[in-house]
Amino acid sequence: MEYLSEIFSDYGVENETNKNFSLQNGYEILSKFFADVEKLKYADSLAVTDIDDMMEYIYSLSDMTTLNNIPKQEIKDVLTRNTKNGVLNVPKEYGMFISS
């Protein structure tokens, strides 16, 4: 969601994902309770080769409803501009914390 919200921010899309505890804010939260906090990140991405499939996915997301008023071709153009060698790499952010 973070990546999609970023590339469609000009269209009013915001990342509304519940972030009570996440990889982004976990260090700050855990450091209040633990002396040592280490964040381990796992770098990964989704390689999308079919932009039409990605568009269908985007339109199925509740956070993307502001795009319903934008012509689909315009959305497709945004996605296409963000591809390299025919692949749209959508970052996935995974990780964990080790605290003691």
Image: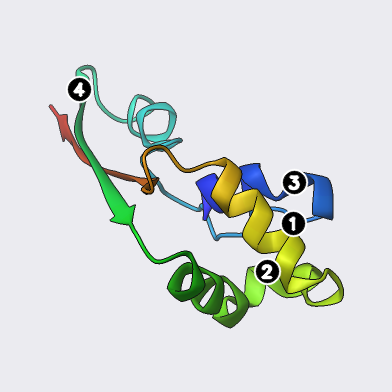
CB-based contact (under 8 Å), mark 4 and mark 2: no
Name the foreground residue: 2 vs 10.
10
Sequence-wise, the earlier of marks 4 and 2 is 4
Image location (x, y in percent) of residue 78: 66, 50
Mark number for residue 89?
Answer: none
Identify the residue position indicated by label 1 in the image. Answer: 13
Q: Are marks 2 and 1 in contact (CB under 8 Å)?
A: yes
Q: Which residue is mark 3?
A: 9
Image position, residue 27 (x, y; %)? 36, 28
Q: How many marks?
A: 4
Q: CA distance from mark 4 to mark 3?
A: 31 Å
x 82%, y 54%: residue: 11
Identify the mark at residue 64; answer none if there is no mark. Answer: 2
- Label 4 to label 2: alpha-carbon separation: 33 Å
Q: Residues within 10 Å of mark 3 (few under 14, many from 20)?
A: few
Task: List x then y, in percent, for residue 12.
Answer: 83, 54
First in sequence, mark 3 or 2: give its number: 3
Label 2: which secondary element: helix
Distance of label 2 from label 1 (alpha carbons)? 6 Å
Q: Earlier in the sequence, mark 4 or mark 3?
A: 3
54 in relation to 11, above or below: below
